Amino acid sequence: MPSTNREGNTPPSDSAGSLVDGPDTQDCSKHAGGWGRAMSDPEYIWYGNKSEDDYPDDACTPYYHKNAQIDDFTINNELTGKTATFSGTVSAPNFNGVASSAKSISGSFDIPHVKNEKLRIRHVIAEGPEAGIYIRGKLKDSNQIVLPEYWDGLVDPSTITVTLTQIGYSQDLIVDSVDWGKIVKVRSGVGANINCYYEVWAERYINPMDHDEKLHVVYEGDSPEDYPGNNEFFLVGGWDYDRRETKWRRPEDKMDSVNLDKDT
């Protein structure tokens, strides 16, 4: 009775009535890839059609890709995962997310409106030892800078600072008062008409529901997980997202890398 292969088909023969002899022993060791003929066709990755229970007992245990390398990669619909790291340029007609190190995208925060549950607030944040936010604009023929209504409950009014830049002539401008954290009143010490640029900064509460929550700028630790405050209010670039090969990696991630190196 002629022998058959795994699919139940008779293997090809050198000539009629003779079968091609296979190897006397199986070689199930892993061999390095990266050789062969490069194929540029965007074909689909092969998918097995046998379950583990149906796989022949005497066959070599198949390999699967835990990690993979490819020259070009085409995604027809969606790419889903936890983190993505790129060493070159990322181009996209629309970007929805946060990038920690990009030339045209800065870190941001997006939180519920503290006074209106139907609204949200998104700000691109400045870097500094506080959660600082600002507004700027031009004041002409008026002595009042009206601060955003959503600042009420969002910022600490005692931290409000104002910078005024005179336009056209000396006006001896003075911040007369900051009323209820909502209105900045300006006056001219020489009675001139006011014409200036302004910039108003304030410190945002780390937790609008708990004003005692403070930012710890410098702290002891080996990673962001050692932060002594509440980490729920922060997303740290290189740790919570956009992770790279740096000292910030978790110990278990380093072990995975070591194990992968041993496998290869």
Image (cartoon, helix red, strand yellow):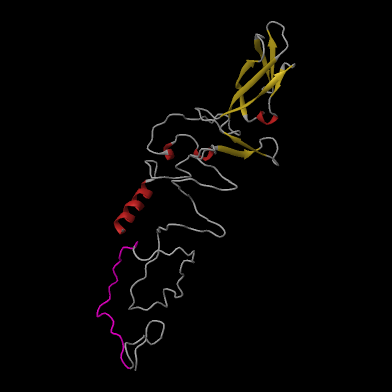
Is residue 2 on the magenta stretch?
A: no
- 21 in the magenta segment: yes
Name the quadrant containing residue 78.
bottom right
| Rendered-image quadrant of the N terminus | bottom left
Q: Residue at x 35, y 52 (%)?
A: 257
Q: Quadrant of residue 161?
A: top right
Tell whether 104 sits left or right of 253. right
Closer-to-camera residue (180/237): 237
Q: Which residues are magenta?
A: 17-34
* Above or below, 6 relative to 113: below
Left or right of 224 in this view: 202:
right
Q: Estimate the x, y position of residue 24 in percent, counting from the top left.
A: 24, 80
Tell which of 9 and 206 is nearer to you.
9
Nearest the camera: 129 or 221?
A: 129
Question: In the orientation shown, which residue stands out farthest toward the top?
Answer: 190
Q: Main secondary structure of the magenta part?
A: loop
- Say if 132 sits above or below 108 in the image: above
Residue at the limit of the structure toward the right, as seen here: 141
Image x and y of residue 120, in percent:
66, 39
Q: Quadrant of residue 172?
A: top right
Residue at 45% across, 72% down: 48
Q: Quadrant of the C terminus?
A: bottom left
Residue drawn at x 52%, y 42% as measured from the top left = 99
Q: Position of residue 123 (x, y in %)?
A: 60, 35
